[in-house]
Amino acid sequence: MARVFMKGTEAIAEAAVRAGCRFFAGYPITPQNEVPEYMSRRLPEVGGVFVQGESEVASVNMVYGAASAGTRAMTSSSSPGISLKSEGISYCAAARIPMVYANFARGGPGVGSIQPAQMDYLQATKASGNGGFRMPVLAPATVQEAVDLTVLAFDWADRDRTPVLLLADGVIGTMMEPVQLPEAKTDEEVAAIKESKKSWACIGHPLDYAHRAWIQPGNWSTLVMQQVNEEAAAMYKSWQKEAKVEEYKTEDAEIILTAYGICGRIAKSAVNLLRAEGIKAGLVRPITVFPFPYAAYDRIDYSKVKAILDVEMSIPALFVEDVDAAVKGRAPIETCLCSGGNIMSREAVIKAAKKVVEG
Amino acid sequence: MNKIYTRTKTIQEDKVSGFCPGCMHSTVMKLIGEALEELNVVDKASCVLGIGCCGLQMDYMAYDNTTAPHGRACAVATGIKRTNPDSLVFTYQGDGDFASIGLAESMSAANRGENITVIFINNGIYGMTGGQLAPTTLIGMKASTAPKGRIAEEHGYPMHMCEILNQLTAPYYLERTSCNNPANVAKTKNAIKKAFQNQLDGKGFSMVEIVTGCPTNWGMDPLKSLEFIEEKMLPEFPLGVIRDRSKEA
Ligand SMILES: Cc1ncc(C[n+]2csc(CCOP(=O)(O)OP(=O)(O)O)c2C)c(N)n1
Ligand code: SF4
Ligand SMILES: [Mg+2]
């Protein structure tokens, strides 16, 4: 497949279509309007459906409906809109409905700023809706990785019947890069995926009490509910071994930078410049922020490390809470932060790293 | 002997309804089941339940169903129908669900002319949560959050959803019925069948608003609640076909 030059938002949308997504509903919000715009043109070409919902609440519930009826379905938004989606996401998690959604995060709280930020970390990884559910949260650092993770998101969603969140930000969404797009699923493959869900899809079944489709985002029986919660908890635990991470030049590092998404990429280039200046820097970049790659932090040689430098576009620091749980006191943790829609500068990261190393 | 009446198979035989005695949710459920059977579309039925007492039937209805978040049934139904045009997709929603928290989803689906059917149960109260004020509560009618009754200056007036949706261009069929006597029950069943048939014929948005009672939260016995429907509810919510595009030239 040839490489093409694409904007992050459109590349993710195209990757979704190629992965077999045939329903998209969304509501405009900067900086991700190209996703619904692209889908409104593209989906009809492949026999799919685009709906501009009357709100994020309606859009995510349209996706809940389409996915409950067996179609690979997706929605996307940015921070304030993601809050509104939480109701529908919680229902999908409860009823074990596979769906994918993307957050092109911007500054917050409130309406915040329309520029990129990483301030939805706790919402994304800990509580994307009521009821203590978890879901895979994938955090791309490049447009290519966003494309690859979009495909993974649909497969993971279907395999475990769970929502999956693509946690991007305004930089990933608006940046243009060359990408290798995945092979598009054929109409037959898309139909086969839908067919495989037919037994539980809410589309009508022959009258037979045992085999009706019953999508249950809840149950009147507390015993059934506890059982559902226990099964889900076991699934969340089983995901731990699927955590994905990039570990870069960590073996001999005296300082470990840690960051996810766009900050991970900025930190990586800071590592290279620091190394050019003789400072042994390394990077741990979680690609899945849930499940969190704890093991990568166990592989660090703490006898050599002066400190861990948490780099994130959020004030207060949020990602640092997971880093802290992973480092378990084996090294001091310093932070390098910005927020409000300001993009992390490589110079700021280098300065902060030097301060740690040189004292 | 000829069998002239059988129980609908769309209600599971070994289950007991969770509805209060005299509640018309169970009547409407039976009518839906009969309509599906008579149209021979039980195997295409995809029911989207709202949140409210309607949810009490999910255990014992025998056809496919899902439960939408409170008020979002029309959005969920949109997603199902758009991706499965051959399914018969209908929502079943109370007045709090359809006309208060779900107003945006309801109006927007109607305005898009979604090819779905809405069964809207107007009992003038929030049944499930214990009798709070609904958008359809009558002036002067008491509710647990309006202890002095609905006061226009404070709460506004009852909302007439058929008439409100009739302001939109897209809806195909809007009818208000009741289940307070055998003749009205028969009319309700015909309206439901018609609304389903419209969908099968690809006509677009149809809604049947059914004026019912809630003996438990109205604080009345079932017979008294029938009188209340006749004397108080129906003058406020007049029955009849509000829109039928098939009758238009
Ligand atoms: C988001 C949300 N808000 C509130 C509730 C609580 N709740 C459950 S049913 C209901 C009202 C139902 O009233 P109505 O739609 O009129 O149905 P009825 O029970 O009268 O048939 C409410 C407020 C809820 N489940 N979810
Ligand atoms: S509370 Fe009212 S609406 Fe609910 S089941 Fe009882 S009578 Fe019916
Ligand atoms: Mg009600």
Image (cartoon, rainbow, N blue to C red):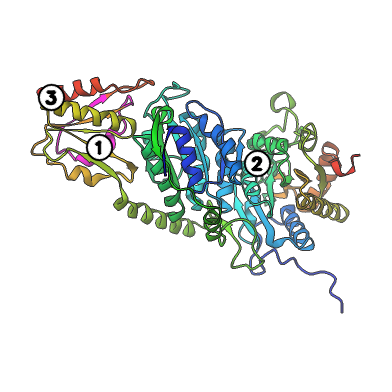
Circle 1 is placed at which residue position? Answer: A323
Depth check: A143 or B150 in front?
A: A143
> Taking A339 as reference, is A90 left or right?
right
Q: Which residue is at the far bottom? A: B1
User: Looking at the image, do the residues carrying marks 1 and 3 touch, with CB atoms under 8 Å apart?
Assistant: no
Q: Is residue A35 above or below residue B216?
A: above
The C terminus of chain A, quarter of image: top left
> Taking A271 as reference, is A219 left or right?
right
Circle 3 is placed at which residue position? Answer: A277
In the image, the segment drawn in magenta is A313-336
Quadrant assignment, res B62: bottom right
Other-residue count near label 3 (Cα within 10 Å), few / some / many at <14 / 14–19 / ≥20? few
What percent of the width, then of the height, locates residue A316?
Answer: 32, 25
SS for tag 2? helix
Q: Chain of mark 2?
A: B
Q: Quick check: is the Cβ at mark 2 less than 8 Å away from ligand 1?
A: yes
